[in-house]
Amino acid sequence: PSSPSPNPQGDNNQTPRIPASHSPSIRKKGVNDFDFGKTLGEGSYSTVVSAIDRTSRREYAIKILEKKHIIKEKKVKYVNIEKNTLNKMNHPGIVRLYYTFQDQNSLYFVLDHAKNGELLTFIKKLGSFDLICTRFYAAQIVSAIEYMHSQGVIHRDLKPENILLDENMHIKVTDFGTAKMLESTEDGEDDRANSFVGTAEYVSPELLKEKSACKSSDFWALGCIIYQLIAGRPPFKGSNEYMTFQRIVNLEYTFPEGFPPVAKDLVQKLLVLNPSERLGSGGKVGIAKLKKHPFFEGTDWDNIWNTPAPRLL
Ligand SMILES: O=C(O)[C@@H]1CCC(=O)N(CCc2ccc(Cl)cc2)[C@H]1c1ccccc1Cl
């Protein structure tokens, strides 16, 4: 098209739109733009494969979902939720969605490749984290939760399997297929998100009792994760899901010998049955109070994403 004549108002809606197919830089990506490598993980509805962009040579993790399976399992809604929530996220502690595309049989999500895998692997390998490491990772999780909630998103299924580690051993929260986008993002106007139950050991009592989660449900999961980093196992674990749920709603858990008192105090303030009394709840004010807890003493909240991760011993 001829170059547009300068428009006195300066608005550019007069500029003729160049069809994407004519401009190489914004062409829609497709399967043939990548060399696929090894499988990184298999979910019940997706497979994640490492892949290299043939042009940029950049490495990605591509999440592939089979359309037939998604439709059969009635999970189309979750696919759209994952795409829409991930598209809204732009934070160092949250896995980034670069492109999406599809072909006849599958949907493709091109994501960050977090090279060091799941936080759960390190908990299993080391047995437990010392206080310095626990504080670093807990602070990064709080920072990621604070950002998600500021965007009106509740994750609803936070757990060590969904907290990945990048090459610098910094976290990348993933798996937003079960997230909930709240209408209102103002402080304190927490809507209740309905249906869907997370992973048994980390599910909040309000989700079990009222079938609805709120932002505070992510702080319950944080309490379970901090407990697990130190104790090497989650606080609520029954011999089956029903027994686990019973322990959660009855707040049946104990601290092992030697559990550091400052961490115990924080966990006791997060694992509170009433969501509005949980430390961290109540919007920005609530999160500020959480960040001030003695457990986080010495945390430089403005620099945790460019502070080297402590060596996991
Ligand atoms: O929302 C979008 O960006 C597009 C819009 C056009 C489109 O057809 N899709 C795929 C819709 C879809 C969702 C689930 C199944 Cl099982 C099949 C098709 C969407 C899509 C494409 C690629 C990857 C994910 C999605 Cl949701």
Image (spheres, rainbow, N blue to C red):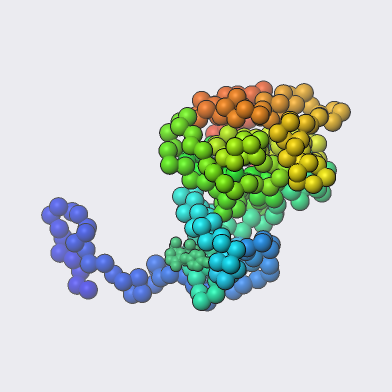
| Depth order, front residue of 41/270 | 270
User: Which image quarter holds the N terminus?
Assistant: bottom left
Q: Residue at x 57, y 46 (%)?
A: 195
User: Which image quarter holds the C terminus?
Assistant: top right
Q: Is residue 17 left or right of residue 104?
A: left
Q: Quadrant of residue 3?
A: bottom left
| Depth order, front residue of 159/292 | 159
All told, the count of numbered labels is 0
Q: Is residue 224 left or right of residue 95?
A: right
**Looking at the picture, how far across and down is residue 235, in whole percent?**
77, 36
Q: Is residue 194 left or right of residue 273?
A: left
Residue 253: in sight, yes or no? Answer: yes
Q: Residue at x 64, y 24 (%)?
A: 293
Tell which residue pokes out farthest to the right in this image.
257
| Depth order, front residue of 49/304 | 49
| Depth order, front residue of 33/268 | 268
Q: Residue at x 55, y 37 (%)?
A: 214
Q: Is residue 283 left or right of residue 16?
A: right
**Looking at the picture, how far across and down is residue 198, in whole percent?**
64, 47
Tell which residue pokes out farthest to the left in this image.
8
Q: Quadrant of residue 216?
A: top right
**Looking at the picture, how far across and down is residue 298, in whole percent?**
65, 27
Q: Residue at x 74, y 48 (%)?
A: 120
**Looking at the picture, how far across and down is residue 110, in whole percent?**
54, 63
Residue 303: in sight, yes or no? Answer: no
- Is 33 rendered above or below residue 221? below
